[in-house]
DNA sequence: GATCAATTTGCACCCGCGTGCAATCTTGCG
DNA sequence: CGCAAGATTGCACGCGGGTGCAAATTGATC
């Protein structure tokens, strides 16, 4: 069956074939492909040469089965409406690929599907599952963890209260203090905070920090509204509803949003719904620094999540064998543009 | 080793365990989990019951290895800057998951990385690789196909000229004719076509169809510019560069863009760069119908890619065992908004 | 109750490679 | 040149389950 090395034989080339060709055993072939394996330089070379000629590449599926390490990370994403998800996906896949991991993308329609998604992931023996979700509650993590079949569960870009879980997240509190400092240095008098769905703990930190900072320095607590979903149109509608019948003098002069998607909706509402101007009439601040925030149509002041650092932190966790839990906060960067 | 059925034992529950408990053989267990398998109702029930009690789920990794079908589809994405990618990812993952496939997301930084990406995918034995790329040339597909290790290669949302490849794509020609019809019914006199990087064949069909339709009915060929990347800012800059020193009377009164990302950049340029108005001074048309197109800030007239139908077509291809090649065109939907 | 076709079930063998240890080969040194 | 430590290499066994066929069972018919 020794084919010429021209046409790539469709019948799979296995380590055995390479072994035969190189005149060594199958296990030596495996060693040649393994970093830090105990193998002589001479046989490594001859194995690699044989592999090259035969077009051999190790089969990761078989390797996963045998080693109980799949080199796969499941990314559970629940809100594909937020452009920031795309940025995160880009960043994470790139880092993971660089480090040799594969990425299983799982679409979570609703938080109730999380357990099912984790099950599916575990059936593929992923080494870790990363929850890049927005609209889910901590309770669901507990449940999912109950049926713990996944080796590691990491909550990304969001804080989980669950003590068994590891969260890797932007330091929302520090970020919001920085934002508040910037805003408090100017004479805003009627701030409004626009948050996501009430009750999701994801939103808590940013809101709480901002409200507290403001109260501390101005003695009053800003008003708050909650948009029922992280959706620009909902934010738009909500703001219009709220301000349409209000005299302009009572409009807020500053709207701080929990994220950019909401902020975009708010800016659209102010400009196209109410016919007022940003930032002259009303200043707006977002969070995440999605690409759109930098566009000339918005020039939205925002806070950039430190995705690179968060990705590195994730990789560190994946590499470590320790059962890690707790929270890792990474500092982001405040990006001031025209909107505030 | 017969544990109580309370705590899920960490040592993996295998089909053998279930078999023992149900008093059948391992193969009968496998049959119970397989649709259309030859198994009596009675044993299926008892197997499923035993499985439930033990918390058994079949191991997809082992199954993949044995059956040579991984149930995995690799999605190769090359341009994470385009929000439309997020829409596609959402749509595809949802369809694929519904049909039982897993999704391997691979980030292609540059077209030169495609062969490597395909290799990685093949090492995980994906059943198919789907190229959701924009900025790559057909040549690369040929090369990648040369080292054919992936069972199926599908080019998604873009036409490949390669005869060995299957493309699933919106019917760009029909779409552009529809767009042109709409525009030709009105008295535009100075159309401009804004395309992506020149040379990528992806852009050919839309551009060619539009130019031809216009020429046919008006006797003149619209002007064309090519943005060096599918990037709103580049489109912005390019348009500014081109029109800044031109008297307004010579500005185009209609800009047709190859996709929405470019159209957004163009609109921003017209409004914020040139201080002119859309659609009063200049009308703009895009393609893809990204979410932003519907926002009140843009109200961009666009053409919605039929993602659901395209996803269904993809699933059909995946299911079929036939070596399919050629092109499948699906009809999308013209969405008229205020911008044109 | 015997007989034969239709169901069900069991099994040998394979998928391609990792783990841990024992066997073998190299070295350096006395 | 002989020997032991260290470096290499080979191997039995297992990972969890799919395939194709043969054995066993069931049921229907006369």
Image: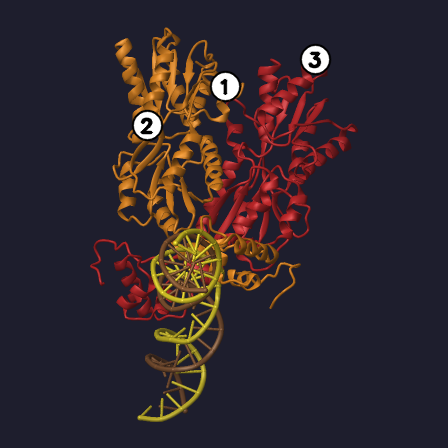
Chain colours: A red, B orange, C brown, D yellow
Q: Confirm whether circles 3 and 1 share one chain.
A: no
Residue drawn 69% across the image and 37% down it? A204
- Asked if disc 3 and disc 1 are in contact, CB closer than 8 Å, the reply is no
In depth, the one of B303 and A244 nearer the eye is B303
Q: Confirm whether circles 2 and 3 share one chain.
A: no
Q: Quadrant of residue B162?
A: top left
Q: To which chain does the residue with label 2 belong?
A: B
Q: Secondary structure at mark 3?
A: loop
Number of other residues with Cα within 10 Å of mark 2, as a class: few under 14, some 14 to 19, many 20 or more: many
Residue drawn 43% across the image and 9% down it? B281
In depth, the one of A258 and A50 nearer the eye is A50
Look at mark 1 in the image and give the residue it sits on.
Answer: B298
Does B191 sit above or below residue A126? above
Look at mark 3 in the image and give the residue it sits on.
Answer: A245
Q: To which chain does the residue with label 3 belong?
A: A
State how far apart marks 1 and 2 are (Cα). 23 Å
Residue B266 visible in the shown view = no
Q: Secondary structure at mark 1?
A: loop
Circle nearer the N terminus (1, 2): 2
Query: What mark, if any, has residue B203 been given in the picture?
Result: 2
In the picture, the quarter occupied by the N terminus of chain B is bottom right
Q: Secondary structure at mark 2?
A: helix
- Asked if disc 2 and disc 3 are in contact, CB closer than 8 Å, the reply is no
Query: What mark, if any, has residue B42 been given in the picture?
Result: none
Q: Is residue A247 left or right of residue D12?
A: right
In depth, the one of A206 and A332 nearer the eye is A206
């Amino acid at each position: 069956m020794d084919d010429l090395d021209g046409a790539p034989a469709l019948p799979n080339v296995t380590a055995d074939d390479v072994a035969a060709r190189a005149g060594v055993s199958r296990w030596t072939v495996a060693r040649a492909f393994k970093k830090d394996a105990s193998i002589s330089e001479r046989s490594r070379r001859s194995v690699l040469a044989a592999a090259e000629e035969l077009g051999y590449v190790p089969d990761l599926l078989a390797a996963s089965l045998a080693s109980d390490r799949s080199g796969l990370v499941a990314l559970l994403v629940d809100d594909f409406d937020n452009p920031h998800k795309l940025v995160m996906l880009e960043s994470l896949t790139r880092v993971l690929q660089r480090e040799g991991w594969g990425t299983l993308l799982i679409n979570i329609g609703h938080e109730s599907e999380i357990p099912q998604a984790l099950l599916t992931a575990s059936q593929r023996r992923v080494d870790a599952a990363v929850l890049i979700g927005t609209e889910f509650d901590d309770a669901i993590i507990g449940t999912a963890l109950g049926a713990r079949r996944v080796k590691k569960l990491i909550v990304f870009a969001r804080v989980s209260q669950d003590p068994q879980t590891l969260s890797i997240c932007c330091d929302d509190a520090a970020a919001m203090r920085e934002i508040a400092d910037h805003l408090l240095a100017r004479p805003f008098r009627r701030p409004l905070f626009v948050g996501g769905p009430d009750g999701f703990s994801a939103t808590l930190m940013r809101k709480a920090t901002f409200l507290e900072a403001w109260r501390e320095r101005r003695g009053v607590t800003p008003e708050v509204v909650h948009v029922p979903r992280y959706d620009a149109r909902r934010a738009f509608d909500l703001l219009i509803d709220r301000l349409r019948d209000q005299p302009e003098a009572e409009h807020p002069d500053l709207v701080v949003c929990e994220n950019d998607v909401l902020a975009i909706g708010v800016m659209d509402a102010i400009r196209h719904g109410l016919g007022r101007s940003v930032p002259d009439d009303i200043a707006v601040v977002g969070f995440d620094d999605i690409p759109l925030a930098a566009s000339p149509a918005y020039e939205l002041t925002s806070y950039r999540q430190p995705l690179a650092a968060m990705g590195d932190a994730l990789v560190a966790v994946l590499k470590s064998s320790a059962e890690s839990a707790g929270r890792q906060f990474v500092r982001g960067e405040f990006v001031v543009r025209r909107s505030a």
